[in-house]
Image (cartoon, rainbow, N blue to C red):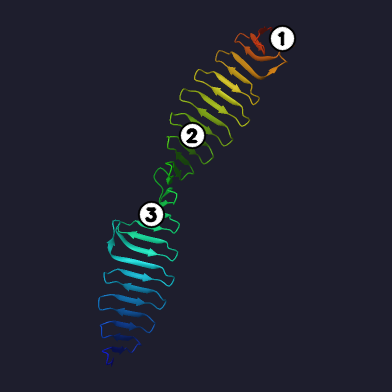
């Protein structure tokens, strides 16, 4: 042990450890491996490890660790604030991670993104107001993610690959793993787009409209009337009693010589009535119709 006129004391241990006690009561211990420990009269404690990591125990009991990359980790002796924060980590890129007493972990990123890790879920809040919730593990119904957009639109993603979008007006859009897309409107009507491009629209009054890739459209109402619109624009209306009416977008000249026929009706009894572009109607005899 060495005593100095200033009141300082120096202790040298056999293993190479040195302890200096200053007149003010400050104690500084230096270990052979380079670790340096300081004990302050007010209760503070500072430890500098051989790798450069610095650990400070503050007067209020908080423990602050500063790593060599300037990451600062603060463990609070008493939970802080309304959210009961017990630990805060500040990274050099200004990312901040806070741990809460209830197990919640919140991360704040430099771009403004916020991520909350709960028990069983992770919530990501983007700067544009979009909120994404990932469930870990997935819900019993297979729900694994919910995305809520600022405009109120919500998209649910399921484990089997399905997506269900709910718009603010109540319209839902379900996308299945095979690419089938089912749109359900507020009034109950649906529009289904199949992987092959065929679209089927069903209305609450029983009407069904099918649109094919070649732009052919077939409409069937609750009474069984079928209206088929061909790519050419021609329409064929079929009634349950067998009556068939054909409307031609371009007048036909191959039905009656010298006449431009715009409509042909085949009645259940086989009678054929045609109408030309002047509005004049005629009944075809069987031989003419066959020709």
Q: Quadrant of residue 158?
A: top left
Residue drawn 50% across the image and 27% down it: 202
Where is 77 relative to 228, above or below? below
Q: Quadrant of residue 41?
A: bottom left
Question: Tag 3: Cα neighbours inside 10 Å, few (<14), some, or many (≥20)?
Answer: some
Q: Nearer the viewer, mark 1 or mark 2?
A: 2
Q: Badges 1 and 3: C-beta atoms under 8 Å apart?
A: no
Disc 1 is placed on an element classified as helix
Q: Is residue 66 visible?
A: yes
Disc 2 is placed on an element classified as strand
Q: Is residue 1 visible?
A: no
Q: CA distance from mark 1 to mark 2?
A: 48 Å
What label sits on residue 183 in the rendered view?
2
Where is 259 relative to 4, above or below? above
Q: Between disc 1 and disc 3, whose residue precedes?
A: 3
Residue drawn 62% across the image and 12% down it: 265
What label sits on residue 98 in the rendered view?
none
- Where does the image place residue 23, in percent across and percent down from the top left? 26, 86
Q: Badges 3 and 2: C-beta atoms under 8 Å apart?
A: no
Question: Tag 1: Cα neighbours inside 10 Å, few (<14), some, or many (≥20)?
Answer: few
Residue drawn 28% across the image and 75% down it: 44
Q: Between disc 3 and disc 2, whose residue precedes?
A: 3
Disc 3 is placed on an element classified as strand
Residue placed under numbered mark 3 in the picture: 116
The front one of 219 and 279 is: 279
Q: Nearer the viewer, mark 1 or mark 3?
A: 3
Question: Tag 2: Cα neighbours inside 10 Å, few (<14), some, or many (≥20)?
Answer: some
Direction from residue 183 to residue 272 in the image, left or right: right
Residue placed under numbered mark 1 in the picture: 288
């Amino acid at each position: 042990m060495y005593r100095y006129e200033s009141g300082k004391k120096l202790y040298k241990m056999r293993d190479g450890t040195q302890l200096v006690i200053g007149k003010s009561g400050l104690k500084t211990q230096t270990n052979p491996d380079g670790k340096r420990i300081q004990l302050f009269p007010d209760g503070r404690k500072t430890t500098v490890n051989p790798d450069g990591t610095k650990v400070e125990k503050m007067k209020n009991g908080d423990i602050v660790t500063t790593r060599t990359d300037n990451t600062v980790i603060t463990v609070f002796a008493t939970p802080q604030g309304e959210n009961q924060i017990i630990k805060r980590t500040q990274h050099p890129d200004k990312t901040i991670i806070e741990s809460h007493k209830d197990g919640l972990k919140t991360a704040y990123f430099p771009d403004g993104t916020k991520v909350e890790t709960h028990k069983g879920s992770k919530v990501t809040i983007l700067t544009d107001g979009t909120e994404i919730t990932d469930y870990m593990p997935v819900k019993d119904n297979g729900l694994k993610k919910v995305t809520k957009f600022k405009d109120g639109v919500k998209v649910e993603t399921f484990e089997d690959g399905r997506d269900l979008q709910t718009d603010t007006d109540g319209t839902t859009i379900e996308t299945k793993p095979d690419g089938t897309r089912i749109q359900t409107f507020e009034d109950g009507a649906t529009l289904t787009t199949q992987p092959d491009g065929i679209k089927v629209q069903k209305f609450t009054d029983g009407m069904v409209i099918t649109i094919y890739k070649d732009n052919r459209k077939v409409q069937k109402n609750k009474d069984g009337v079928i209206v088929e619109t061909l790519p050419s624009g021609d329409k064929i209306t079929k009634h349950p009693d067998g009556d068939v009416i054909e409307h031609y977008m371009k007048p036909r000249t191959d039905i009656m010589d010298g006449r431009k026929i715009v409509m042909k009706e085949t009645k259940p009894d086989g009678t054929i009535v045609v109408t030309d572009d002047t509005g004049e109607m005629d009944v075809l005899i069987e031989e003419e119709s066959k020709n």
